[in-house]
Image: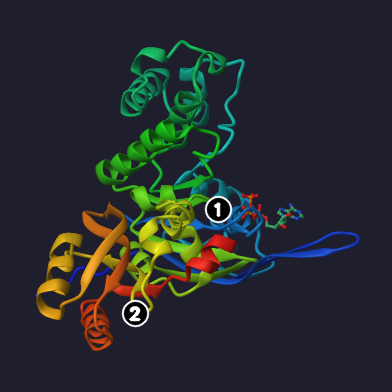
Amino acid sequence: MRQIMAESVITLKQVDVNFVEKKRSVHAVDHVDLTVNRGDIYGIVGYSGAGKSTLVRTINLLQRPTSGAVTVLGQDMLALTPKQLRLERRRIGMIFQHFNLMNSRTIADNIAFPLRGRKSKAEIAKKVADLLDLVGLADRAGAYPAELSGGQKQRVGIARALASDPEILISDEATSALDPKTTSAILDLLQSLNEKLGLTIVLITHEMEAVKQICNRVAVMDEGRIIERGDLLQIFAQPQQQLTKDFIDTTIQLDAALKSVVAQPAVQNLKPTDRLVRLTYVGDSTDQPLVATLYKEYNVVANILFGDIQILQGTPFGNLIIVLSGAPADLDRTFAYLKANDVTVQPIDPKEVANS
Ligand SMILES: Nc1ncnc2c1ncn2[C@@H]1O[C@H](COP(=O)(O)OP(=O)(O)OP(=O)(O)O)[C@@H](O)[C@H]1O
């Protein structure tokens, strides 16, 4: 059988960035290893100051690492001459939070800018028209940036980044200045470019929601280090680090759900043997068969107080807050059954939630 091997397009090995200033030094990136494969949409998530921007800027050497190795599309980036580096950077597009457009030039001129002197006027005009079409702005070629909405400006940023047909696109908080609906539309556009053009995307963000929408792989960054990484589904199903869990919980607004759940009578009047738990699962088990099985097979009644099912890469990701009532031995068998079926069970202490 023919095996399709993943082709690595970005490899960072022990990349370290230390900013030394007069009075202090900042270890912005701390010996990071990272491999991004062709066709990935690789999310890097972390709070402000975690080192995400600095890390991704080492990919195209906008930031030179203090030490470590950077290989992009088979090139040892640190071995390139300045001229070679300029050429290599054309294969790595970049988009930014604040769009970085030239306000005195039209949309078409902004997109044409990286192509000047490299192609004939007619070729540039054709390319710009194709790019505007690709990002859904075919009718705005003559407009100026100030006449566009934030989402439209980012579409121009994307078109400009694609002008030199890059194989990799780095997105540095590209949706952070946009409202949720516009964010979602821009993420959809990035996903369609990944599919249509085979574009590899590295997406840095402080919003797990964005990662959830389009990424197939994710790394969580904290204090310059990658503290956890993996396939999106694997990370959502079995997060190991508290920070990763916190980021995932933001996507289901769990804190708000817990607060309202613990105020409900079903929780206020828990019997000593009742168990208030959170169930998390990735995959086919949906709430209804699960609840039916617990009752039929184990005599345990499950009262669902909160349920959230999202679809990640076509696979359900479910979170239930539930009261389980039954005889202690039946409850024990229920927990064993849930564990065997890869459903994570976490006890919830109502007092702790109420006081948090
Ligand atoms: N050129 C610089 N000189 C000195 N310190 C810097 C420089 N660039 C970044 N830093 C510091 O490095 C750390 C990491 O910053 P970085 O911008 O990479 O984080 P981030 O996760 O991208 O956060 P944000 O989303 O806020 O940009 C921060 O403490 C920051 O102050």
Q: Does residue 14 appear in the picture of this structure?
A: no
Is 146 in front, or is 87?
A: 146
Which residue bears the numbered disc 1? Answer: 60
Is 15 in front, or is 275?
A: 275
Q: Does residue 162 appear in the picture of this structure?
A: yes
- Crowding around mark 1 (Cα neighbors within 10 Å: few <14, some 14 to 19, many 20+) is many
Residue drawn at the location 30% of the way across and 55% of the way down: 307
- Say which quadrant the N terminus sits in: bottom left
* Residue at the bottom extreme of this rendering: 329
Side of 288 where 322 appears, left or right: right
Between disc 1 and disc 2, whose residue precedes? 1
Residue 326, quarter of picture: bottom left
Residue drawn at the location 14% of the way across and 72% of the way down: 295
What label sits on residue 196 in the rendered view? none
- Residue 52, position as x, y percentages in the image: 58, 56
- Residue 266, position as x, y percentages in the image: 35, 61
Q: Are marks 1 and 2 in contact (CB under 8 Å)?
A: no
Secondary structure under badge 1?
loop
The picture quadrant for ligand 1 comes to bottom right
Q: Amino acid at mark 1?
A: Asn
Q: Amino acid at mark 2?
A: Thr
Which residue bears the numbered disc 2? Answer: 273
**Residue 353 higher or lower than 300, as above or below:** above
- Residue 47, position as x, y percentages in the image: 60, 56
